[in-house]
Amino acid sequence: MEFKNWAILAGVSALAACASGGRDRPNDPIRALLSADAMLFVGFDRDGDLSTSAAEVDSGIEREFVRADANRDGTLQPLEFQNWSNIALGGGQIGPYRLDFDRNVDNAITREEFDTEIHARVRDYDTDENGALARADFVRRVGQTREPREPRVRPPTR
Ligand SMILES: [Ca+2]
Ligand SMILES: [Ca+2]
Ligand SMILES: [Ca+2]
């Protein structure tokens, strides 16, 4: 579940290869991976310290939910999500997708569902688990996933 949304733009590695001026050696690792949620989380860094803190995540969630909820009814209908995805996630072709958020599949994304999905994604990126997302947390090789974590007990509310 956690890794199903890794979206890889093959074009990114092609761009990276171009940017290196053709100096790529055959065994060079592929260095670039881009996903739309990473763009979102970089944009959450309001104080410009190149790290997205837990507080910035929370305020970013608030801001984006308000932005998306065009009719201000407290939930995101499919069209609202689509419009938001188009501007915030670069078109929505690489996820996260509406049904990633709408866990109970009732065609409405509540604020709680929005929070839950965003926080799960933050945890996935937060390699050192310090609650903040540094730029390095967003950089992985294509196909690379995190090491499996030790199982741990989650609060019963999650
Ligand atoms: Ca910051
Ligand atoms: Ca709405
Ligand atoms: Ca729902």
Image: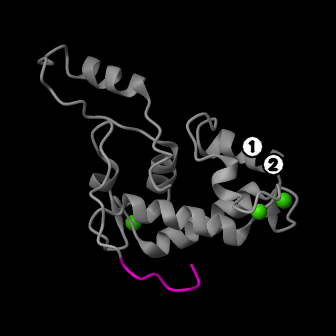
Q: Is residue 153 magenta?
A: yes
Question: Residue 82 got which mark?
Answer: 1
Q: Quadrant of residue 62?
A: bottom right
Secondary structure of the residue carrying tag 1 is helix
Q: Determine the quadrant in which ligand 2 lies.
A: bottom right
Q: Residue at x 26, y 67 (%)?
A: 128
Question: Residue 78 got which mark?
Answer: 2
Is residue 138 positioned above or below 149 on the image?
Answer: above
Residue type at tag 1: Gln
Q: Position of residue 82 (x, y in %)?
A: 74, 43
Q: Position of residue 68 (x, y in %)?
A: 74, 55
Quadrant of the snapshot with the C terminus: bottom right
Q: Residue at x 20, y 22 (%)?
A: 20
Q: Position of residue 125 (x, y in %)?
A: 38, 58
Q: Position of residue 86 (x, y in %)?
A: 68, 39
Task: Judge from the rendering whether residue 70 lies leftward or rightward of residue 28; answer left or right.
Answer: right
Disc 1/disc 2 C-alpha distance (Å): 6 Å
Is residue 100 positioned above or below 25 on the image?
Answer: below
Residue found at the very far bottom of the displayed protein: 156
Residue type at tag 2: Pro
Examine the rendering and report whether any part of residue 47 can be seen.
no
Q: Is residue 126 magenta?
A: no
Is residue 78 positioned above or below 26 on the image?
Answer: below
In the image, which residues are magenta?
Answer: 152-158
Task: Judge from the rendering whether residue 10 lies leftward or rightward of residue 97; answer left or right.
Answer: left
Q: Nearest the camera: 48 or 7?
A: 7
